[in-house]
Image (tube, rainbow, N blue to C red):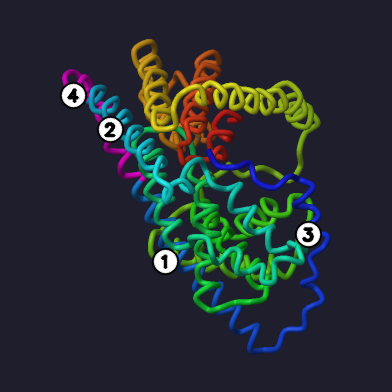
Amino acid sequence: MSTTGPTKEVKIAGALHDTSHLLIENWAEIGRNFILVIIIGITVWLFCSTLRLAVEHSTEYLFAPFHGAGAHVTAAIVVLLVVLLLSGLLRGWLVSRPAWKDAEGDGAGTSIAYFHKTYSQNPDIADVTAVRYRQPAFMAALRRIVMTILTVGMGGSGGIEGPVIPIGESLGAGWSRIFRIKNPHDLRVLQMAGIAAAIATLLNAPFTGALFAGEVVFTERLVYRTLLYSMIAAVTAYTLNNHFLHFAPLFSIAKHTHVYAPREYIEVSLVAIICSAPAGLGVNYVLKVLGKFMHLFPTFLRAAIGALCVGGIAMFMWFSLHIGPDNVLGISEGTLKELISGTGPAWLSVWWILLLLAAAKLFATGFTYAAGGSTGLLIPAMYMGG
């Protein structure tokens, strides 16, 4: 699994010690950075769109037979379990190779660590940008795409928002290296712009992508110069989404009057107290326990064992309740959309089935993540919250 990344204190310290507001840029530097973040936005969009489409099509192919009947379903069960096992074995073999080690886990922590190393005050490091440039960039992004397809696209559970963070950061750093950027302030701009474009590509929300990138790298502070350039990269990805993929926002919420009744405030408060806080703590606890459990096995077998556990959870839901694997495995965005819109099957309004689905998604994602799968936790968290 990837490292957890810098602590909250390190992130805040980076924002507090950032001196980019003191920079005096000439028009040539502003123009160069403007062009660079657009190039990064285009490149990140290409990589992340390819990943998203590959995952969508592969999971659709895997899960479609479960909406049929008879022998087709029996064959689909066998195919799904075999694909899960083989993809797990292949991932285990790949991460045992040094070149692929950086593709294990979601990679977000490592990418954020790269970002904050540019704030290093170590006198022994003459050029902090060179520290990042010695690490893989474009190849790291390609390996991350392959590993994520082998994880989520082959039936593992989780989102792809986590894995696109290292993809965006790697492409930002890669273009920075090509243009021989020596100023760490500019390197950070391009790294964060890559992350913002990656998130905007998936969520089709540019401002959300830029704010998400700022929150991920700085936690409680915003560096406005970096945020501004991130917005440009995110809008570039958003524009390409709309013109070439006609990608709609991930979720559409029904319109609501600007006046909220007191009852609604009470309901939201109760949900936060009774559901959200315990669920958040529970998710962290389950992930820690599953992480310790999976580390009992050799590295090259963890992914396969995790995949079999995930398959077992999906088969339990299928044979006990006839609920298809697409409601537990993969990204499961469709289930969440049906929950929000109220257009799903009747069993999506049965409270105990909803609780069982939340638990199944938690453990399926937990086994995938704990086994070193390249998967994210954002959409699963939204799924369980929904």
| Along the line of sight, the residue nearer the viewer: 368 or 52 | 368
Tell which circle, 3 or 2, labels the residue nearer the N-terminal end: 3
How far from the left and from the top, in percent, is residue 288? 61, 26
Q: What range of the chain is rendered magenta?
A: 55-75
* Circle on res. 15: 3
Secondary structure at badge 3 equals: helix
The magenta stretch spans residue 182: no
What residue is shown with label 4? 72
Secondary structure at badge 4 equals: helix
CA separation in Å, label 1 and label 2: 28 Å
Tell which circle, 4 or 3, labels the residue nearer the N-terminal end: 3
How far from the left and from the top, in percent, is residue 256? 66, 42
Please say if the residues under marks 1 and 3 sit with CB atoms less than 8 Å apart: no
What residue is shown with label 1? 243
CA separation in Å, label 1 and label 3: 35 Å
Tell which circle, 1 or 3, labels the residue nearer the N-terminal end: 3
Please say if the residues under marks 1 and 2 sit with CB atoms less than 8 Å apart: no
